[in-house]
Image (cartoon, rainbow, N blue to C red):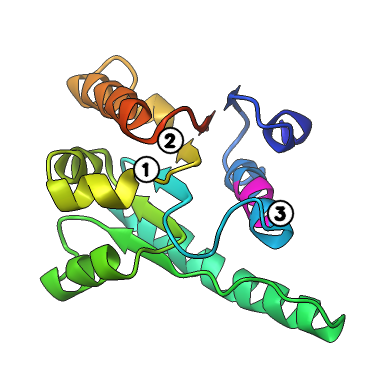
C-alpha cells in the first residue's frame, strides 16, 4: 500500500490487526508535512474511526513521533513543523471544541458521528474546508450498516466542501 499512498492514490488496505496499516497511512501524511506539501496550520489530515477509544489512541501515538521527528530534523539543522493533533468525539469538552475552531489542528481524529455534526455547522465547515487526506480506519466495522451509509454521505459532503482529497480506507 505504501507506494500507492505515497503517490497520492485512493487506497483500500486490508491486512491483519497490528500489521502497520494505520502507521502506513500516517507515514505518507508525515512525509507531506515534512516536505511542506501540507501546511502545519489548518486541518490537512482527518482520521475517522468508528471507535472513539481508537481515535484517542491514534492521537496519543502520533504526538510522541511528531516530537521525535522534530528533534531528528533539528539535529540536522532542518525544521519539522509543530503539528497540533487533536481528537473530537461526543466526550470532547466544549472548551477544546472551541479551541479547534480558533486554532485548527493539522490532524484531527474523530468519529463518523462527530464528522456529521461538524458538517452540519458553519464553524465545522470552516474547519473541514482544508482537508487533503482522509483516513478511514476499521471501515469493515461499518460496511453494510446505516452508520456506514451515513459515513459515506459525510465523506461525499466533505469532498463537495474541501474539493478532492486522498482517501485511504483500512
- Residue corresponding to mark 1: 49
- Residue corresponding to mark 2: 138
Question: In the image as oriented, which residue stretches furthest toward the top?
Answer: 144
Separation of residues labelled 3 and 1 (CA atoms)? 22 Å
Separation of residues labelled 3 and 2 (CA atoms)? 23 Å
60 w.r.t. 22: above or below: below
Q: Nearer the viewer, residue 143 or 84?
A: 84
Question: Quarter of the image holding residue 117?
Answer: top left
Highlighted magenta segment, given as a residue range: 26-30
Number of marks in picture: 3
Marks 3, 2: nearer the viewer = 3
Indicate which disc residue 14 carries.
none
* Magenta segment, prevailing SS (helix, strand or loop): helix
Identity of the residue drawn at 24% across and 72% down: 99
Identity of the residue drawn at 71% across and 54% down: 31
Question: In the image as oriented, which residue stretches furthest toward the right?
Answer: 76
Marks 1 & 2, CB-CB < 8 Å contact: yes
Identity of the residue drawn at 69% across and 77% down: 70
102 to the left or right of 167 = left
Q: Secondary structure at mark 3?
A: helix
**Residue 5 rendering spot, x and y as whole percentages:** 68, 34
124 to the left or right of 75 = left
Marks 3, 1: nearer the viewer = 3
Q: Secondary structure at mark 1?
A: loop
Which badge, 3 or 1, comes first in the chain's sequence?
Answer: 3
**Residue 72 rendering spot, x and y as whole percentages:** 79, 78
121 to the left or right of 30 = left
Indicate which disc residue 31 carries.
3
Amino acid at each position: 500500500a505504501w507506494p500507492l499512498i505515497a503517490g497520492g492514490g485512493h487506497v483500500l488496505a486490508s491486512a491483519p490487526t497490528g500489521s502497520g496499516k494505520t502507521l502506513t497511512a500516517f507515514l505518507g501524511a508525515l512525509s507531506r508535512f515534512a516536505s511542506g506539501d501540507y501546511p502545519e496550520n489548518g486541518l490537512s489530515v482527518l482520521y475517522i474511526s468508528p471507535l472513539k477509544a481508537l481515535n484517542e489512541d491514534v492521537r496519543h501515538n502520533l504526538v510522541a513521533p511528531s516530537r521525535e521527528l522534530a528533534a531528528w530534523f533539528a539535529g540536522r539543522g532542518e525544521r519539522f513543523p509543530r503539528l497540533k493533533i487533536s481528537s473530537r468525539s461526543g466526550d470532547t469538552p466544549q472548551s477544546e471544541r472551541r479551541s479547534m475552531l480558533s486554532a485548527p489542528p493539522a490532524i484531527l481524529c474523530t468519529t463518523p458521528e462527530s464528522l456529521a455534526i461538524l458538517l452540519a455547522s458553519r464553524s465545522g465547515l470552516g474547519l473541514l474546508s482544508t482537508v487533503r487526506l482522509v483516513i478511514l480506519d476499521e471501515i469493515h466495522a461499518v460496511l453494510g450498516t446505516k452508520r456506514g451509509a451515513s459515513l459515506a454521505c459525510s465523506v461525499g459532503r466533505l469532498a463537495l466542501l474541501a474539493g478532492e482529497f486522498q482517501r485511504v480506507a483500512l
